[in-house]
Image (cartoon, helix red, strand yellow):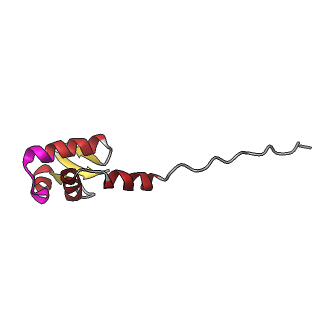
Amino acid sequence: MLGAMPRLHVMPSPPSQLSLLDETLTDLEPDIKQVLDAVPLEPTSFDLIAQKAGLPTSSVLSALMQLELMGLVSQLPGMRYQRG
């Protein structure tokens, strides 16, 4: 016969990734948020993103790099970007 099962101490669950994402999105600078809003889920060319964002090219490039480092945007071959 098996002995009694040991009690497991349940740790409180960490904040969900969605709540962390919400915090991250509310803390973004306005230009970075504007660029993120211009990046759709499907692969999109840099030119279209820059046009949608309505910001200077250098600002869009800088924002995209920061968003990549944050894991919010991915760069694909051919200067295309998508969320995630």
Tell which residue pokes out farthest to the left in this image: 56
Quadrant location of residue 6?
A: top right
In the shown orientation, is residue 78 left or right of residue 36? left
Quadrant location of residue 64?
A: top left
Instruction: Tell me which residue sits at (27%, 48%) in the image.
Output: 73
Q: Locate residue 72, reporting x and y percent.
A: 31, 48
In the shown orientation, is residue 28 left or right of residue 14? left
In the shown orientation, is residue 22 left or right of residue 53? right
Looking at the rendered image, the quarter that the N terminus falls into is top right
Q: Locate residue 37, reporting x and y percent.
A: 23, 58
Instruction: Tell me which residue sits at (13%, 59%) in the image.
Output: 52
Quadrant location of residue 70?
A: top left
Q: Is residue 74 magenta?
A: no
The range drawn in magenta is: 51-60
Instruction: Tell me which residue sits at (32%, 54%) in the image.
Output: 25
In the shown orientation, is residue 6 left or right of residue 15? right
Task: Name the foreground residue: 2 vs 8.
Answer: 8
Q: Locate residue 18, reporting x and y percent.
A: 43, 56
Q: Locate residue 14, reporting x and y percent.
A: 53, 48
What is the magenta segment's predominant secondary structure?
helix
Q: Is residue 57 magenta?
A: yes
Total count of labels = 0
Task: Name the foreground residue: 80 vs 54.
Answer: 54
Task: Name the foreground residue: 60 vs 73.
Answer: 60
Task: Name the foreground residue: 82 vs 51.
Answer: 51
Instruction: Tell me which residue sits at (15%, 54%) in the image.
Output: 49
